[in-house]
Image (tube, grey):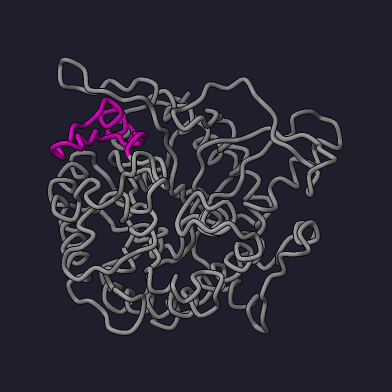
Amino acid sequence: MSGLQFPDDFLWGVATASYQVEGATTEDGRGVSIWDTFSHTPGKTLHGQTGDVACDQYHRYEEDVALMRDLGLGAYRFSIAWPRIFPQGKGQRNPAGFDYYHRLIDKLLAAGIQPMVTLYHWDLPQALQDEGGWPARQTAEYFADYAAECFGELGDKVKFWITLNEPACAAYLGYETGLHAPGIQDMPQAYRAVHHLNLAHGLAVQAYRDTGQNGEIGIAPNPSAVRPATRREEDVLAADRARDKWARMFLGPIFSKGYPQRHLDAYPDCPLPIEDGDMEIIARKIDFLGLNMYTEEAAGHDESHPEKYKILPNYHPKTEMDWSITPLGIYRLLKWIDKQYDHPTIYVTENGCAMADTLSPDGRCHDADRIDFLKNYLRSCAEAITDGVDLRGYTLWSFIDNFEWSLGYSKRFGIVYCDYVNQRRVPKDSFYYYRDVIAGNERFD
């Protein structure tokens, strides 16, 4: 047998996010989120598509959990929709929202599947955006209150908590480029959002510690995976600088290393609204680091860029997202994090690919390219464990095809095919491959 094997207690899971799969956006007292507003604004999403129905998991969670049980899963990573709990983001809470998550979690536990709960996967209540959103400090405080309510209500059942999913996307895509909700293009606002998202994370960790509960809490960023295009010193430095905005601006404060000053110096018009005590709050100890990783890029020196780097072309094949398939990249990123941040416990909280999936005449979905992708990325994960990285689990993105944000329903990431006409679920070939991985029937040599 190969030496590249996963430990017997390795946690295998799948992942989704509330707005991408739940649907039922106007049912049972749920409030309006920024993604409801954004997706209903003409021109913001492909074909004007929305998450109003999505995969209808709100009504079909029992069917989905049954499929997860067939997979042999150890964990299901999903997110709570903040506006289901607090329709206005604060104040009066909505009991029906918690009722849904109780039903889902109870069904998971009965199937032997651990709930891995993300508190924020981008669906900020619109009422809080109207008060300033993430560029406003009070949003971090409201998030801590919401998190505390979730811990108090669900903490006896949930042992894995994730504060924020990809805060870099929430800040930069939401407030700098405007590609995501709330669709604002204002760089100083984006950097205020960065700090307040980090603060929200720290306040939520503090709130969890205050409960005395015995679960684990972490965060799931998507730090940039970058390699130097050549061995030249300027390209090596360029690749290192390319990690600042998407990696060190979040990992630095979380691991008590602060913000990367050279990055802040490159954008003097974007000061961070740091107040006394903030950095200590953000650096409250986490139990694990979630890692969302899909692709790695090559960087070279560019004197004209404020940070002196540029992303260069490469030879790798692409997914439907036009992301390069770079399995060695996840190994390199895991090793970089392990070295930079003193050997943290890590869970890969997202990894997967969008492919041009269709149903064949036999009624199946034969997604051989996804299976190949998973084999190669999982091999790199196994190599990282062999080489000393404390990697404890892997949650594949995603369980089912779903609403891919501004790209609507045009990209399919799932190992379960969703027929959006009738909500029929069809396990893809990759579903059965992943079942074999979880059962220990695959080799990675």
Residue 420 shown in magenta: yes
Q: Quadrant of residue 408?
A: top left
Q: Residue at x 53, y 21 (%)?
A: 317
Q: Quadrant of residue 228?
A: top right
Residue 185's place in the image compared with 228, above or below, is: below
Determine whether, in the image, residue 130 is placed left or right of residue 78: right
Front residue of 89 and 352 = 89
Of 295 and 91, nearer the camera is: 91
Quick check: 444 above or below 8? above
User: Residue most toward the front?
Assistant: 42
Q: Is residue 210 magenta?
A: no
The location of residue 165, given as percent across then percent down, is 46, 57
Q: Tell me where residue 105 appears, x and y as whole percent.
A: 21, 61
Q: Bounds of the magenta span?
A: 409-437
Residue 265 at x, y percent in the picture: 80, 60
* Front-lying residue, 321 or 372: 321
Question: What residue is shown at x 25% (from left), y 35% (from top)?
Answer: 416
Q: Is residue 102 visible?
A: yes
Residue at 50% across, 55% down: 166
Residue 352 rendering spot, x and y as whole percentages = 42, 36
Q: Residue at x 73, y 37 (%)?
A: 310
- Does residue 131 appear to the left or right of 358 in the view shown? right
Q: Quadrant of the N terminus?
A: top left
- The mark tally for this picture is 0
In the image, is 339 to the left or to the right of 369? right
Q: Is residue 246 above or below residue 218?
A: above
Residue 4 makes an appearance in the image: no
Q: Nearer the viewer, residue 49 or 373?
A: 49
